Amino acid sequence: MKYMTDTKDIFLADSNILIYAYEKTPSPEQKKAEDLIARCWASKIRLAVSIQNLAEFAYVAVKKSKLSFDESRVFVEDIANFNGFAKISYSPLTVISAIEISKKYKMSFWDSLISATMIENRIFNIYTENTRDFKVPGINAVNPLK
């Protein structure tokens, strides 16, 4: 696995942040998430997304009728093609690590997989609405929507 360099200040944007950012109904959470993502588009900050985050975003955005299939595809394509978002993925060994994290910290498998993917890619910060879901020591979970 090729590790990213200089990841100390990079935050992974969790799926819920991406979904809030692209909701069509204005809310305080939507505005804060939109502003955060806009800072990345403007190259003021660099964010990371995991392939899992993009898949969750696409599924939830369409399932909950927040975006059409086409809108969801364009969003994912835009992130995939923009270097301001570091894209991280996982391997079969990451899945094994996620199982161990889930067992040890009594976390959902999917949050454990995000945590394991972050650790493997040396990213230790995550923006998420669900800070309590990331119990792994060394992972700094921050709610930017407060």
Image (cartoon, rainbow, N blue to C red):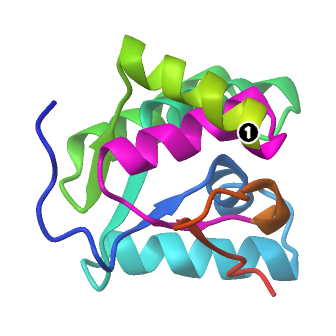
**Horizontal side of residue 100 vs 83, given as left or right:** right
Residue 88 spot, x, y in % from top left:
33, 40
Image quadrant where residue 40 sits? bottom left
Q: Is residue 71 visible?
A: no
Q: Nearer the viewer, residue 106 or 40?
A: 106
**Horizontal side of residue 145 vs 84, given as left or right:** right
The quarter of the rendered structure image containing the N terminus is: top left
Q: Is residue 32 visible?
A: yes
Image quadrant where residue 141 sits? bottom right
Task: Give the extent of the magenta segment.
Answer: 105-128
Residue designated by label 1: 104
Q: Residue at x 24, y 62 (%)?
A: 84
Q: Amino acid at mark 1?
A: Lys
Residue 73 spot, x, y in % from top left:
49, 27
Q: Is residue 108 magenta?
A: yes
Q: Nearer the viewer, residue 76 or 7?
A: 7
Image quadrant where residue 2 sits? top left
The quarter of the rendered structure image containing the C terminus is: bottom right
Q: Nearer the viewer, residue 34 or 50?
A: 50
Number of residues whose C-alpha sits closer than 10 Å to that of mark 1, classed few (under 14), some (14–19) or many (20 or more): few
Outermost residue on the top side: it is 92
Residue 32 to residue 117: above or below: below
Q: Secondary structure at mark 1?
A: helix
Q: Residue at x 88, y 32 (%)?
A: 64
Residue 33 spot, x, y in % from top left:
65, 72
